[in-house]
Image (cartoon, rainbow, N blue to C red):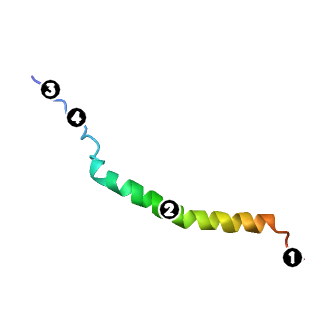
Amino acid sequence: MAQTLTLARPARNLRPYLWLALPLLVLATLFFYPLLLIAEQRCATPAAT
């Protein structure tokens, strides 16, 4: 009696999404960098009491 071995499907090929990596990195930088600057400014200035 022959036994068959079923292999798990390989992970989906992510190569088509590689072109999205650079634009997403640029957008993330444009979004988070100003937030970082605002946070640094708030920490640097003493709180008004």
From the image, state whether disc 2 or disc 4 is nearer to you.
2
Marks 2 and 4, how far apart at CA = 38 Å
User: In the rendered structure, which amino acid carries the disc numbered 3?
Assistant: Gln
Asked whether the residues under the numbered discs 4 and 3 touch, taking CB atoms below 8 Å apart as contact, a structural biologist would say: no
- Residue identifier under label 4: 7
User: In the rendered structure, which amino acid carries the disc numbered 2?
Assistant: Ala
Report the disc number at residue 3: 3
**First of labels 1, 3 by sequence position:** 3
Q: Secondary structure at mark 3?
A: loop
Residue at image location 85% in from the left, 72% down from the top: 47
Asked whether the residues under the numbered discs 2 and 4 touch, taking CB atoms below 8 Å apart as contact, a structural biologist would say: no
Against 20, residue 10 (above or below) is above
From the top left corner, tell me how far across and down residue 44 is, in percent: 79, 64
- Residue identifier under label 2: 28
Q: Secondary structure at mark 2?
A: helix
Residue at image location 87% in from the left, 76% down from the top: 48
From the image, state whether disc 4 or disc 3 is nearer to you.
4
- Residue identifier under label 1: 48
